């Protein structure tokens, strides 16, 4: 269990950097946005991992389990917000990419820079 | 058993992520990122985050895949082959990963009840929800009431994205509309394809029903306005794909969509303002009724409805804006 | 304090925020502009009232939903946030009042309701960051203001606005996500999101790796948002290709709000608790500030495009602001906060002049404005005065903050002289790039007969209002100095 906990954090770190790598290295603008969403997904995992409680269940308190243990609701709330922020950014980014395609005829960063010279 | 399953899922997550970045076929990348979201949702479920899992599945695997595919239909299906090697960036990223992994060794032990996360603020929410709001789902209580101001902000983030896309793309067909060989939505829809049509038509009512259930059941089980908005929007998008975009616009015209976007956000804000008018603070729902607990429940119900309305409106507007650009 | 008074902190945010959905429903010709301007002026009036309450010594706090902090979200206004609120709401109001004609030129009529709604959301997002006392709430409002700014910038008439705004979107999102990671790590170690509570509880765990990692993530993330050198690369193009009025608004305040959060986090949460953090802060920030000042000014000297020249000058000016903070003294931080205020005045006025020129000239390049002072004497006179303030000539607002900065540098010990020399050199560089424009406008002959007239009256009027404020606050800097000193004392933990 302890090893699994560490593994969660490692996966967070690796995912974060895979996403960042895609954002930095990829020239295709849509690929950059996909990388950005991986990057954000890593953060979701970090928050949710820290909220887990040994032997806990989802924080829905009914009469049947009123004395039980519950995982932390707060990180879950924060990540609900963050997921929505993520999709909003993605939608706006895609809108910009579509306009770039219409104006420049390409969505590869190097070709756009070539046209702008 | 859960431990092995956890390891397996996380490893699968990493493999998918690498495949997403590696694939030069953007279509494959998008489909894989849909899978990635589903895997992530299962992980969240294992970590007791039912609400987050539902949202990630609806938003990550559903809506964001649809939006990405619409964008691909207009822009490009393939990524250009990389021109130069990227060893330098790779090395930096690997070093940063190792530093991060080293730093996480100092994290509190996983799922430890004595970790600071479980000590300070969290138990208060668990206790106070039963007393002050009296609904089972603590996540909904924190989201809607204790931290309702964050959620108001979140609705306005969605609102901003919606008006941003409308501002950028408008509702007119773009210059690529004429020449574009990939049609996002056929004006006649998929009417000639029997199987998608029959199966899709059967699914739509159930998705809508499930959306409404998620909307109004958010206080008792996982769910709420965001998830419901995403689900209802998904049902209507499916309808648009099957019957043609224009049929969907006949059901809900653009002017109504704008009304939904503005109305939902305003509904949330006005409920908050009632707190001020009735002599308490902004977003205090207790004063909405003579019984504070009933007032809280009423407030939560209304703001969740506001959230659901705005999210549905924004997602549909964005879809139509993208679709109008790709029309021939 | 009356009942209504106590709601001002939240009204500061929700007045523009809730007006935005109303604005998109309006489609008569001038109505969206009128409503947006009214909401912005209303926000400015609230900011003035809050600043007066703060100066009268009141502490202003507000619990949302009537839930007590740290469980609920708390708002708090002190001297620092009051001053920043004045800058943000003032810049928005001036730009809107001045900008109706200029924005008509850049934004088609049927897109205007959406544009003004985005404007109000940017304003409300920036104000929301300034009033909140909750670390995660800062993230939410940061995203509102960022998404809204992307929309505003993408309205620029040049197609190059689009790649510029895409770059801004990617870098801005990385910055915000870094901040989110940092907040998450601190939450993991302390169990709280309220800033004051965080500062209190972080002491016990201050030496553990996750906290150090969090400090790194938050600093880098906010530095990206604040365009601190070398993370400024999104700024020049975004400011250059944005609609002229959007540049006036955002250049005056957007990056400065990120600096506000950075200073607040660093001085409140990290420096009192993390051993050696103050040294690291100086060690990283001081060289970067100096590089920003020198590189920004040098590029500005050789830049032919006017708005880009001004944007590079902003990179240098952000360097001054961070330089003051990196000295870690009350006088240094005072200079820093004061320069946020004064630079907003000077740069706001300069970008207003750019908007005046943009009304009459298609391509804003130094060669294209040759001899223009004959045709637009009032505009160019405003440029000269605002330029003097940017350089820091006595009698202008810019002088006051440079003077504070130089004084603080002298106090900082052995390296003080070197810092002063660099500040003077870069001021000379500012003389050079301002002079290049003046020289072209006043002393060169126009290539052909220019058939242009003076800028529209409302625009010119507001430009002069801001220019005269530069002069006024050069002679009577009492209010900003009082607020800035109050802010610096707060940041250094001295109760005034």
Image (cartoon, coloured by chain):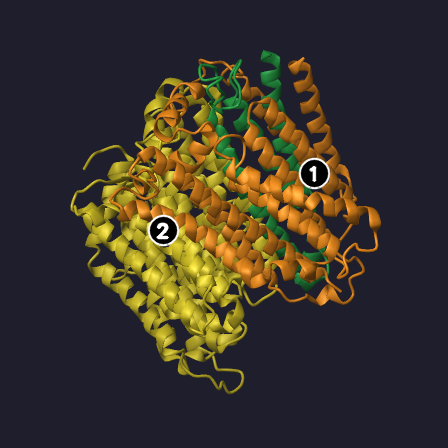
Asked whether residue C236 appears in the rendered view, the answer is no
Chain A is which colour? green
Report the Cα–Cα distance between label 2 and label 1. 36 Å
Q: Tell me residue A102's x, y (percent).
A: 69, 62
Q: Vertically, is C488 above or below C189?
A: below
Which residue is identified by label 1? Answer: B34
Q: Is residue A106 left or right of B116 when viewed as pictured?
A: right
**As displayed, is residue C156 above or below residue B261?**
below
Q: Which mark is residue C130?
A: none
| Residue positioned 46% across, 35% down in the render | C218
Most foreground residue, B118 or C384: B118
Relative placement, left or right, of C82 versus B124 is left
* In the foreground, C261 or C278: C261
Question: Which residue sits at x=72%, y=26%?
Answer: B12
Q: Nearer the viewer, residue B64 or C352?
A: B64
Chain C is which colour?
yellow
């Amino acid at each position: 269990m302890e090893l699994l906990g560490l593994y969660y954090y490692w996966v967070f770190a690796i995912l974060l950097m895979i996403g960042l790598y895609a954002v930095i290295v990829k020239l295709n603008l849509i690929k950059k946005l996909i990388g950005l969403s991986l990057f954000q997904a890593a953060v979701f995992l970090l928050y949710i991992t820290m909220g887990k409680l040994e032997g806990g269940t989802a924080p829905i308190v009914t009469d049947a389990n009123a004395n039980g243990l519950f995982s932390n609701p707060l990180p879950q709330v924060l990540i609900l917000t963050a997921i929505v922020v993520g999709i909003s950014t993605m939608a706006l980014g895609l809108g910009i990419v579509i306009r770039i395609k219409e104006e420049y005829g390409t969505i590869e960063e190097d070709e756009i820079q070539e046209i702008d010279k | 058993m859960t431990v092995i399953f956890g390891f397996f899922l996380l490893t699968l997550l990493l493999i998918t992520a690498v495949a997403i970045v590696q694939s030069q076929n953007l279509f494959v990348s998008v489909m894989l990122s849909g899978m990635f979201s589903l895997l992530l949702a299962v992980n969240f479920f294992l970590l007791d985050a039912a609400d987050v899992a539902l949202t990630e599945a609806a938003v990550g695997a559903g809506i964001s895949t649809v939006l990405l595919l619409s964008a691909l239909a207009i822009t490009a299906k393939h990524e250009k082959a990389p021109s130069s090697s990227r060893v330098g960036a790779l090395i930096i990223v690997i070093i940063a990963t190792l530093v991060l992994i080293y730093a996480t060794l100092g994290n509190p032990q996983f799922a430890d009840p004595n970790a600071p996360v479980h000590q300070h603020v969290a138990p208060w929410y668990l206790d106070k929800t039963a007393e002050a709001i009296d609904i089972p789902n603590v996540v909904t209580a924190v989201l809607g009431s204790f931290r309702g101001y964050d959620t108001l902000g979140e609705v306005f983030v969605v609102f901003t994205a919606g008006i941003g896309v409308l501002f950028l793309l408008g509702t007119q067909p773009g210059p690529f509309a004429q020449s574009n060989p990939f049609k996002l939505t056929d004006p006649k829809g998929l009417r000639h394809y029997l199987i998608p049509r029959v199966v899709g038509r059967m699914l739509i009512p159930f998705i809508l029903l499930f959306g409404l259930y998620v909307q109004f059941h958010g206080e008792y089980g996982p769910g709420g306005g965001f998830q419901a908005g995403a689900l209802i929007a998904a049902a209507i998008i499916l309808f648009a794909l099957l019957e043609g975009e224009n049929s969907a616009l006949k059901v809900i015209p653009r002017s109504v969509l704008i009304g939904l976007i503005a109305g939902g956000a305003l509904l949330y804000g006005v409920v908050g303002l009632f707190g001020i008018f009735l002599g308490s603070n902004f977003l205090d729902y207790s004063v909405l009724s003579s019984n504070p607990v009933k007032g809280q429940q009423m407030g939560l119900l209304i703001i969740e409805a506001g959230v659901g309305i705005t999210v549905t409106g924004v997602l549909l507007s964005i879809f139509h804006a993208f679709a109008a650009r790709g029309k021939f | 304090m009356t009942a209504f008074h106590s709601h001002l902190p939240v009204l500061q945010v929700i007045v523009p925020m809730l007006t935005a959905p109303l604005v998109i429903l309006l489609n008569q010709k001038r109505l969206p502009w009128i409503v947006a301007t009214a909401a912005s002026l209303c926000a400015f009036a609230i900011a003035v009232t809050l600043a007066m309450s703060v100066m009268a010594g009141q502490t202003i706090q507000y619990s949302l939903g009537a839930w007590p902090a740290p469980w609920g979200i708390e708002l708090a206004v002190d001297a620092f946030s009051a001053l920043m609120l004045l800058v943000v709401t003032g810049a928005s109001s001036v730009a809107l009042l001045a900008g109706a004609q200029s924005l008509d030129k850049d934004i088609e009529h049927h897109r205007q309701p959406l544009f003004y709604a985005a404007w109000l959301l940017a304003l409300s997002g920036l104000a929301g960051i300034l009033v909140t006392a909750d670390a995660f709430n800062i993230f939410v409002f940061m995203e509102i203001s960022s998404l809204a700014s992307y929309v505003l910038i993408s309205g620029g008439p040049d197609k190059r606005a689009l790649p510029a705004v895409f770059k801004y979107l990617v870098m801005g999102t990385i910055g915000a996500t870094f901040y989110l990671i940092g907040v998450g790590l601190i939450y993991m170690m302390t169990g709280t999101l309220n800033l004051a509570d965080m500062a209190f509880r972080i002491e016990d765990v201050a030496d553990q790796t996750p906290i150090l990692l969090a400090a790194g993530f938050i600093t880098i993330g906010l530095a990206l948002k604040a365009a601190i050198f070398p993370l400024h690369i999104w700024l020049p193009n975004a400011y250059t290709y944005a609609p002229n009025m959007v540049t006036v608004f955002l250049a005056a305040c957007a990056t400065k709000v990120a600096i506000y959060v950075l200073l607040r986090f660093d001085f409140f949460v990290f420096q009192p608790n993390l051993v050696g953090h103050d040294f690291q802060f100086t060690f990283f920030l001081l060289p970067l500030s100096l590089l920003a000042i020198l590189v920004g000014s040098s590029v500005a000297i050789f830049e032919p495009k006017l708005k880009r020249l001004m944007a590079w000058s902003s990179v240098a000016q952000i360097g001054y602001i961070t330089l003051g903070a990196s000295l870690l003294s009350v006088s240094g931080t005072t200079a820093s906060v004061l320069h946020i205020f004064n630079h907003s005045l000077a740069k706001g006025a300069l970008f207003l002049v750019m908007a005046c020129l943009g009304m009459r000239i298609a391509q804003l390049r130094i060669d294209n404005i040759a001899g223009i002072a004959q045709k637009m004497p009032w505009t160019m006179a405003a440029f000269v005065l605002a330029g003097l303030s940017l350089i820091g000539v006595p009698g202008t607002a810019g002088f006051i903050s440079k003077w504070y900065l130089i004084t603080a540098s002298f106090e900082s010990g052995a390296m003080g002289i070197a810092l002063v020399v660099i500040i003077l050199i870069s001021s000379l560089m500012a003389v050079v790039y301002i002079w290049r424009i003046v020289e072209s406008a006043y002393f060169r002959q126009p290539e052909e007969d220019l058939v242009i007239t003076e800028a529209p009256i409302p625009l010119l009027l507001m430009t002069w209002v801001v220019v005269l404020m530069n002069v006024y606050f050069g002679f009577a800097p009492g209010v900003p100095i009082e607020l800035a000193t109050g802010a610096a004392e707060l940041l250094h933990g001295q109760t005034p």
